[in-house]
Structures are given as C-alpha cells and as structure tokens.
Image: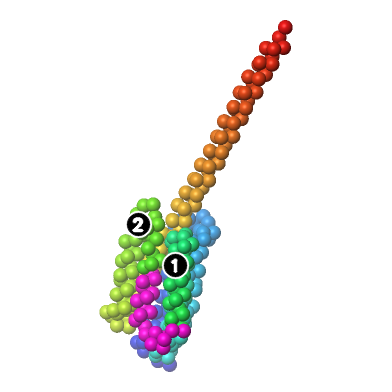
Amino acid sequence: MECGEVCQVEIMNAATMLPPVFSCVAACWSVGHKAWWRSPAAIAMLAGWFLMIPASTASHLYCAFNGEYLPKLERLDQACISIASVLAAWALSRSNLFTTLVASICLCFVLLMFAGPEDLHQHVAWRTQTLSGIVLLYLSPMVWNRQSFDFSIPPICMCFVFGFLMAVWAPLGPRSHPLFHVALIPYSYYTCRSAVLFEMSHEAMRDFLVTGKREDTDTDESTTLQTATSEGGDADWELFEMEKP
C-alpha cells in the first residue's frame, strides 16, 4: 500500500505525540530527581499525557490509512485532552475549587461533543477554540497562584502561540500539525517543571507552618514548666523557713 503525503504527515503526527512524555519526565527529574515519581503533581501531569497519547495516536493513524479523520475518534481525542486539562489544573493550582471549576467546564464541553446538537458533532472549529480556552484557563494559576514570577510563563506563551498558529491557521498546510506537536515538547517540559516546583514550595511552606506551630507549643510548655518549677521552689523555701527552730 502506497503511503502518500497525507499518510506520511499523519504518521508523523502520531509519532510526535510521544516525545512530550519524555520532556515531562525530564522536567520532573531536573527539579526533584531523587524521588520525582512520588510527586503527586508529576504523576498527574504524566497521567494526562498517557491518557491523551492512545486516543490521539489512534485518530492520526486512522486518518493515515483511510485518508480522512473519523469524527468519533476526533471527539474521543478531544475528550481525553479535556480530562488531562483537569489533571493539569489541579497540578498547577493545588486548589480543589479551581479544579472543580475546570472539571465542570470540561464536562459541559464533552457532553456537548457527544450528546449536543448534531452541528456541534461535526463542527471542528468551535471544539478547537474551546479547548484553547480551557488550556489558557488551566495555565492561569501560574499567574495568580504564585508567590513570585514563574519563569516558565514566557516559554509556555511562545509554545502556545506557535502551536495555535500551526493547529488553527496551518500556514504550511498539512505539515503544520506535526510542528504543533513538536511545540508540545518544550510546552510539556515547562508546564511540568512549574507544577513540580510549585508543589515543592507548597510543601515547604506547609512544613514551615507546622514547624512554627510545634516550636510555639514547645515554648509555651517550657514556659509553663519553668513557672511551675519557680512557684514550687518558692513554696519549698517558705516551708523550710517555717520549720527552722
């Protein structure tokens, strides 16, 4: 079977979905290489990628060997991206309230894709634009939920703009989409790095507060003991004075 341009491009699309996983692992290792696999943030980010890869690969390979996308696989791919967005929202914010907000929006999006009006089932542009908005939403904690400037923001913004141009406007035609996937490699690195660094600072602050409370408690107990000892010593001295002949 001859593999034409569409086939080659779609196989390239499928192949370029795997490298972002390795860049995510590299980011986690570079930040906390001793035990990054125990990091809930790292696990959440990696779980999102492992969830997206099978659906995306299946959709691109189907198109490679059939010459067109299967709408059901496209929607499945975008549903997996929605679930991964919820995981990323939690990892980047560590806020249950914000994660619930993102999850509610993604749930509505998925329901509209599969159970909404027929026009929405076939309309690709609104799904792409909605997913872009969801991505910006789950990235927003890097701006409003950090104690200092997050230096992962500039490279992530560049990757997002470049990927959006390649995926939506496609200036190079079919060959634009593989470049969008290539942009996901540094994007994955910096989002995972931000999530793990934030988790480490969050845990350090929690430990600091717990240690501070423990030291305050120990100080209070020590002061009480000293007071009791002092009062007891005065009472013993008075008793000694009374017993003197």
**Mark 1 neighbour class, 10 Å CA radius: few under 14, some 14 to 19, many 20 or more:** some
Name the secondary structure under disc 1. helix
How far is mark 1 from mark 2, CA to CA? 25 Å
- Can I make out residue 64 in this image? no
Left or right: 57 in relation to 236 = left
Task: Reply above or below: 183 against 200.
Answer: below
Q: Residue at x 51, y 59 (%)?
A: 39
Left or right: 211 in relation to 63 = right
Q: Which residue position holds label 1?
A: 101
Name the front one of labels 1 and 2. 1
Name the secondary structure under disc 2. loop
The disc label shown at residue 226, or none: none
Name the residue type under label 1.
Answer: Leu
Left or right: 143 in relation to 82 = left
Q: Residue furthest bottom?
A: 1
- Residue 108 in magenta stretch: no
Q: Residue at x 46, y 75 (%)?
A: 107
- Residue 132 in magenta stretch: yes
Q: Residue at x 53, y 46 (%)?
A: 210
In terms of sequence position, does the residue under pointer 1 or pointer 2 come before the other? Answer: 1
Name the residue type under label 2.
Answer: Phe
Q: Which residue position holds label 2?
A: 151
Colour logic: rainbow
Which range of residues does the magenta coloring cover?
115-135
**Mark 2 neighbour class, 10 Å CA radius: few under 14, some 14 to 19, many 20 or more:** few
In this view of the protein, which residue sits in the foreground, 25 or 38? 38
Q: Main secondary structure of the magenta part?
A: helix
Task: Reply above or below: 186 against 7.
Answer: above
In this view of the protein, which residue sits in the foreground, 105 or 35? 105
Q: Quadrant of the N terminus?
A: bottom left
x and y percentages locating residue 207 in the rendered image: 51, 47
Q: Residue at x 35, y 87 (%)?
A: 5
